Amino acid sequence: MDVLMRSPGEAQRNDQPRKQDIARDFGGASDTYESASRLQRHMGNIMLDRLGPWRPGSDEPEILDLGCGTGWYTRTLRQAYPEAHVTGVDLSPGMIGHARSNSPADIDWLVADAGCIPFPDNSVDIVFSNLMIQWCERPLSVLAECRRLLRPGGVLVCSTLLDGTLKELEQAWAKADPGRRHVNRFEAASAIKRMVDEVLPGGEVTTGTVTLDYSSPLALTRELKSLGAGYKGQDRRRTVTAPGRVRAMCANYPRTREDNVLASYQACWINYQSPSLDC
């Protein structure tokens, strides 16, 4: 989940995911994604709560679910705002195909890169993006694209993950397989705040820790696989990790006094409202 910014011409790091790998992995997980999306539901429901009192100011409101995945929140937004036209956008054709086949016909679907969305300027009332920008090579450009799309008074609600996410799993793998990354890289909270200040002036950034429990470390890794969220760096092993290393990871995974297996996710939410014309 590397979202570190690169200057023009800078070589892509080996721990940085490629777009084709992201699209393939998530598309391959389309059938299992919703059953494993505990974190995604928690993060997205908080975003819906923040949208609750908002109502579109335009006569033909447009809502964009950016990084829509299987379309869970695309459908939810359609129900919450029945007067609006809703479009789900995702990089993965597999995810879009799954979403289209399991959704009402009045929702539109689009395969597109979040950094270059084929919508006109000032054409969207709500951009909803749940746990997507951590997969983007240049999240600053994606946030700027969201601002471009918003109509006056329009709202962006966005969530992402931060450095320190899955620290327990990272520590366990560091002992079991030294020198090899197994956990995706995440941006620091300070970097996200700088991006928001630069392209979303007045935007609000809030952070927190979400802790989920698992029956075992292997249950955690199975959930990540079901989400399509395994490690995506170009330096990842192309063969199955040796059973001995997996056992060592499990043995080194930290546990609570009650012998529970917990995973920490460093969560971040971004809220921004485009200035109204009368401001």
Image (spheres, rainbow, N blue to C red):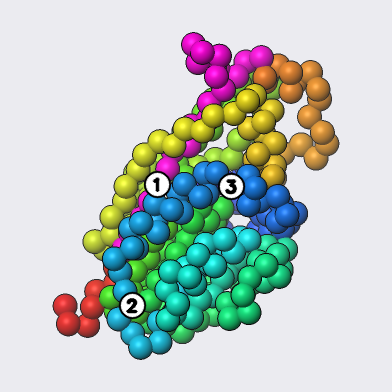
Q: Residue furthest left?
A: 279
Residue pointed to by mark 1: 268
Q: Residue furthest top?
A: 257
Write the start and end of the magenta stretch as one range: 251-272
Give the class, few, some or many, for how many residues have Cα within 10 Å of label 2's Cα (few <14, many ≥20): some
Helix or strand or loop: what does disc 3 sit on? loop
Residue 37's disc number: 3
Q: Is residue 276 left or right of residue 179?
A: left
Q: Tell me the kind of residue under disc 3.
A: Ser
Which residue is located at x 24 percent, y 61 percent? 202
Q: Does residue 148 appear anywhere in the picture?
A: no
Give the class, few, some or many, for how many residues have Cα within 10 Å of label 3's Cα (few <14, many ≥20): some
Helix or strand or loop: what does disc 1 sit on? strand
Residue 255 magenta-drawn? yes
Residue 232 magenta-drawn? no
What percent of the width, then of the height, locates residue 271?
33, 59
Which residue is located at x 51 percent, y 13 percent? 258
Residue 56's disc number: 2
